[in-house]
Amino acid sequence: MEKSFEPAQIESTWYARWEASGAFKPTGSGEPYCILLPPPNVTGTLHMGHAFQQTVMDMLVRYQRMRGMNVLWQVGTDHAGIATQKIVENQLAAEGKTRHDLGREPFVERVWQWKEESGSTITNQMRRIGAAADWSRERFTMDEGLSAAVRKVFVEWYRAGLIYRGNRLVNWDPVLGTAVSDLEVNNVERDGHMWSIRYPVAGSDESLVVATTRPETMLGDVAVAVHPEDERYAHLVGKTLTLPLSGRQIPVIADDYVDREFGTGCVKITPAHDFNDYAIGVRHKLPPITIFTLDAKVNDNAPETYRGLDRYDARKRVLADLEAAGLLVETKSHKLQVPVSQRSDAVIEPMLTDQWFVDLTSDVQTDGRPGGRKAITEPALDAVRSGEIKFVPENWSTTYTQWLDNIQDWCISRQLWWGHRIPAWYDDAGNIFVGEDEADARAHAQVAPAGALKQDEDVLDTWFSSALWPFSTLGWPLDGPVKDANGNVVADWSHDRIYLPSAVLVTGFDIIFFWVARMVMATKYFTGQVPFREVYINAIVRDAEGQKMSKSKGNTLDPLDLIDGIELEPLVAKSTKSLLIPQVREKVEKRIRKEYPDGIKPIGTDALRFTFAALASYSRTINFDLKRAEGYKAFCNKLWNAARFVLMNLPEGQAPTPAGTPATEAERWILTRLGQTLAEVEQHFVSYRFDHLAQALYEFVWNEYCDWFLELSKPALNGEDAAAAASTRHTLLVVLEAVLRALHPVIPFITEEIFQEVAPRLGVAESSVYARPYPHAADFASDDAATAEIEWFKAVLSGIRRIRSEMNIAPGKTIPLLLAGGEATDRARAAKFAAQIAFLARTEAPQWIAPGAAEPAAAAAVVGSLRVLIPLAGLIDLGAEQARLAKEIARVEGEIKKCEGKLGNANFVANAPAEVVAQERQRIVDWNTQLAAMREQAGKLEG
């Protein structure tokens, strides 16, 4: 082995070998175990959330394969309709063209070309994380097999009456010209205004005052609503108002939706451009009036003076005209939540458009067939309520069921060119014909088509194909093999259905509605099974201070920069290149230069993965701290150095296996602790407590194996008992090999590299640690008696070392050791371990003080009723040590007074951030603990 661990030298080598050898493919034997990768956008690059989530999945996949399971990690990418189309449209814009210049088919061909050239970025980055995925089965949501599944599902649901076309209110992106899902909309707080407008009561001197943040939409008002119990306006309910600027007559209606205490208690109702107003309009049978075109300009339903104006230009004109008419009562500054498109940054406009929907809310159709709630929604609810699907942590099941209990019909159409084109055709009379192709649509026609058929221009929501991921990727609906473009078999439903349901879905809470629930709906309906048995909701990765990672804050981290390292200037350039606002760019650059003055040092994949594992608790968010990652790089180095120590103490060739039980109690102790640790690890894998799992392995490897057992082995290795030495060498090797297997799911690269050196010494036949069985607690004998002996020995040794450290005694200096008190077992143990204590603690042979005899001035450690004493005489300059302690005591007392002064200041406690106050209180506790220890030590020296 090389003297130092260099991650970069081994990571690329081992991953390529694993993949080339087919190590990630299902073995074909054992119980099926499947994990579905949430398909990342084909446009994407690996971010910290991906790296964290994929580390969790990879740990599970490697662990279960080593347990003998027939493992499939099904991977692939999503066609990401809006994001991908936008990238290619931007490329065309740079050429001075639009997609309309090319036409639909050439544009789609151009997108496919981009996908082939640039669409594998994220999957290559996944390989850098170590993802043990079966890449030979990689799928794409628009490959032919998955496209066939999409068409079949659409057609079957349509023919079952569960998909319909209707005119409904949707989130509309006026720049992209398409409906978008709630997930693609960010609610952004912005500074705005609240305008109060007077609406005259027709035929009266009375009026109502209505407050709005969008005065331009009043051109589409159809009513003003008040609360039915609001006495101020009860006499006006049923009367009409004259809509300012338009002159239309609109009614005053009563509805419980209105909050009497907010504003004037009067709400303008614009059903065509507000979701809440739409619901009120439906309740009161108010016909909606659309006032905007699809590019957010005022249409012909508004007075002529406003037609053709952009919605914000129309706002200015409307306000000016209201003021001129004396109807603008008040203008106030107001913070408001503005819905903004993730993809275009345009403000979303609620818009009435013709769209396709999946029925999820009706109990029974008009012809008596089950409606969407009975056929789709309720089975998905029952799957979780019955325990057939379990959420981890369990509280997320409530989020899931509450959403399904209050679900709305699902808008599945998008006005794009890139995506699964809706398999519906129209004749000249506007009749709809649905089928898997035009011939199928004609064959199932209820009426003869009038003229030629024209296919619907829209495509399906990306989430529609993603909802089929659990079974479409396995080959459904075909009965035979599904092949890719190169003729390679990527799925076969007749065999691969064994992987349904998959074992666990690892995903974020933000797509429980958009993806998780829809997968349950579709999979239950079309296969009769749940898509997965468990859903592990992973935390969201934030920065070290708990702030959301954002490019505009400059606190994002590229996982590959952590793995490979990056110099300061490239890091600054990378972090600021997409920031267009100079002030933001300068702020981010300043932060980067402050936090990473020397850039980012490489930590390697294994250290990054261990960090993620150690952070993977049940909490909603995790704070990623680079310093912690550096600590886990130190762990990898410690493991590497321990392996070198073991190998250097072995003879050439395969180490002989000693007969009988291990010769020393230290060996039997470490084997007992290994078994206990493995039992813990197994439970933590079951409960998805990766943080506890990582901690258990860390403490065993660092503290017990490296710090203790390697030390405890030295007396045997350097002693004259050949049998003890041989047995100890073998146990060192056996435990190391088991540790490599136990750690492999967490840190695969370093464990594989060390295994290649260790395996031949034990005569292990497998060529990879990944092919070895995961170690079981039962594989290692437990010896409670030996454990008790060694724990006593460790306590004595720790006590001596602590005294040496506190007294600043030189590590190489041999010191006297006295023992007092204790039981008969302490005397027996002291005699048995005398040589080891002397060897490891650098002491003279221990001497017992007779009961009642005078004791010299000494520092003491207590082990049960035994006192371990180190005489002070001759070891230190007593006066100098007393003076040093007095100085330290005075300094700490000063620090305590500073803290007490701050906390005694009422203004500080009241106005400082809570975390700062808590930090000061903790500092007092820490300083007082330190002060007590120093005063105790000073007392010992005086005595």
Image (cartoon, helix red, strand yellow):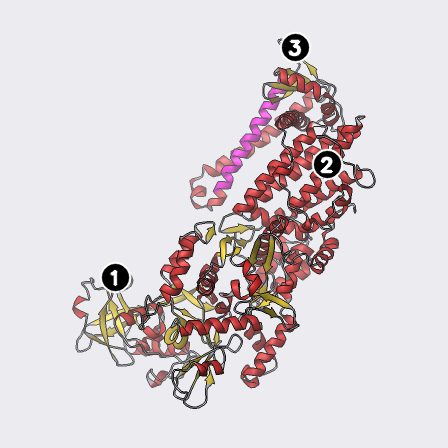
Label 2 environment density (alpha carbons within 10 Å; few <14, some 14–19, many ≥20): many
Mark closest to the chain's N terminus, 3 or 1 = 1
Reading the image, the residue beneath label 2 is 732
Residue beneath label 1, please?
260
Q: Which residue is located at x 72 percent, y 30 percent?
A: 660
Along the line of sight, the residue nearer the viewer: 831 or 685: 685
Placement of 911 over or under 147, stated as above or below: above
Residue 47 seen from this side: no
Image location (x, y in percent) of residue 531: 49, 59
Q: What residue type is labelled 1?
A: Arg
Looking at the figure, which quarter contains the C terminus? top right
Is 36 contained in the magenta span? no
The majority secondary structure of the magenta stretch comes to: helix
Determine the residue located farthest toward the bottom in the rendered image. Answer: 451
Res. 140 mark: none
Q: What residue type is labelled 3?
A: Ala
User: In the depicted view, which residue is nearer to us: 409 or 257?
Assistant: 409
Vertical side of 345 occupied by 815: above or below: above
Q: Which residue is drawn at 82% across and 41% down?
A: 653
Q: Residues within 10 Å of mark 3 (few under 14, many from 20)?
A: few
* Residue denoted by label 3: 850
Task: Give coordinates of residue 100: x percent, y percent.
Answer: 54, 84
**Residue for point 67% across, 45% down:** 741
